[in-house]
Image (cartoon, rainbow, N blue to C red):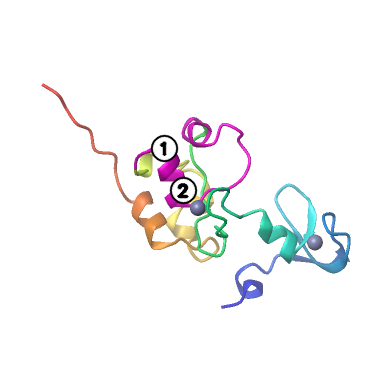
Amino acid sequence: MSWRNKFNDHDGIGVCDTCQTSKPLHLNASNIRECHECWLTRFVCMDCGINTRIIDEYYTLKDTIWYRANPRGDGMLCIGCLECRLGRSITQDDFRLEVPINMMEFNERFPKSNRLINRLSTRKTWTIVI
Ligand SMILES: [Zn+2]
Ligand SMILES: [Zn+2]
């Protein structure tokens, strides 16, 4: 499947804010007018360089968890690198479950990798010490 089929929210041809060339533009959530190539670079994992949008690992965590993994705040991490930084596997409780990109109902619009689906459906297990 091509990207144009997956994300067809183009805003017509115009000048890209980032590379300044005339191309079909995406109008993304922050109203930045960017071409497809510049837009895609926003999803590159900071640690391993894989594109999280291409491997379908685009998700939103609770701020406390995200800032623990990434004190700078901005940027993207794939699930593998995120868990490496946190030193543990993430579970359902770490995600902002009220956000559509994390919801299973929106899988068609926001596809999820197998390991992302796995984490989103794993409940936190409590170790009770008596
Ligand atoms: Zn561009
Ligand atoms: Zn990574």
Q: Which of marks 1 and 2 is nearer the N terminus?
A: 2
The picture places residue 47, in percent across and down from the top left corner, at: 54, 48
The residue that label 1 is drawn on is 86
Crowd around label 1: few <14 · some 14–19 · many ≥20 (10 Å): some
Quadrant of image for the C terminus: top left
Q: Is residue 56 left or right of residue 89?
A: right
Query: Viewed as shown, does residue 22 lie left or right of 5?
Result: right
Beta carbon of the mark 2 residue lies under 8 A of ligand 2:
yes
Q: Is residue 127 above or below residue 33?
A: above
Q: Position of residue 16 (x, y in %)?
A: 84, 60
Q: Within 10 Å of the Cα at label 2, are there few (<14), some (14-19), or many (20+) other Cα atoms?
A: some
- Going 46% across and 48% down the picture, which residue do you hit? 81
- The residue sitting at 14% across, 24% down in the picture is 129
Q: Is mark 1 on a helix, strand or loop?
A: helix
- Classify residue 26 by image quadrant: bottom right
State the residue position of label 2: 81
The vertical placement of 51 against 97, above or below, is below
The residue lying furthest to the bottom in this view is 1
Q: Which residue corresponds to the image point at 41% horizontal and 37% vertical from the top-left? A: 86
Q: Give the range drawn in magenta.
A: 64-88
User: At which x and y percent is residue 83?
Assistant: 41, 44
Q: In this view, does 130 lie to the left or right of 92?
A: left
Ligand 1: quadrant of the figure = bottom right
User: How far is mark 1 from mark 2, CA to CA?
Assistant: 9 Å
> Which of these two is toward me, 44 or 120?
44
| Label 1–label 2 contact, CB within 8 A | no
